[in-house]
Image (spheres, helix red, strand yellow):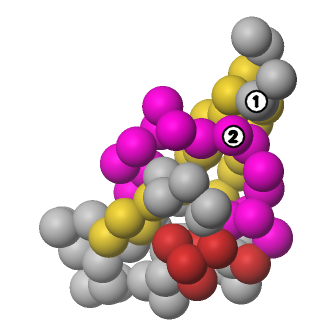
Amino acid sequence: MVKKGKIEIDRELCKGCYLCIRACPVKVLSKEDAANSAGTYPVIASNMEKCIACGNCYAVCPDVCIAVYEEAV
């Protein structure tokens, strides 16, 4: 059975390195169109329904601005 997940991203901490976008096996993440207060374009969870709570995005984030939660099915 595939796990369901939820991602929370602190857009003010995100510096826009996009390592998490490349690490996501199911393409949940994408670049946001609006800049944060630092002037960088953070990541958003644009396809949250696809999230399998693998934690890859959390593991590669150098700024620890992503939290991953496994949802009960």
Location of residue 29 by image quarter: bottom left
Q: What are the residue bounds of the magenta stretch?
A: 44-59
For the point 39% across and 57% down, the residue is: 44
Q: Nearer the viewer, residue 7 or 53?
A: 53
Q: Picture coordinates of residue 58 (x, y %)?
A: 74, 64
Disc 1 vs disc 2: Cβ atoms closer than 8 Å?
yes
- Tell me the quadrant of the picture where the N terminus can be found: top right
On the rendered structure, is 61 left or right of 9? Answer: right
Q: Which residue is mark 1?
A: 2
Secondary structure beneath dot 1 equals loop
Judging by the rendered image, the residue that carries numbered circle 2 is 52
50 or 64, which lies in front?
50
Q: Earlier in the sequence, mark 1 or mark 2?
A: 1
- The Cα–Cα distance between marks 1 and 2, rounded to whole angstroms, is 7 Å
| Residue 50 magenta-highlighted | yes
What amino acid is found at the position of numbered circle 1 in the picture? Val
Q: Position of residue 69 (x, y in %)?
A: 75, 36
Q: Residues within 10 Å of mark 1 (few under 14, many from 20)?
A: few
Tell me which residue sits at (26%, 85%) in the image: 39
Residue 55, by quadrant, is bottom right
Q: Amino acid at mark 2?
A: Ile
Question: Circle 2 — which element?
Answer: loop
Label at residue 58: none
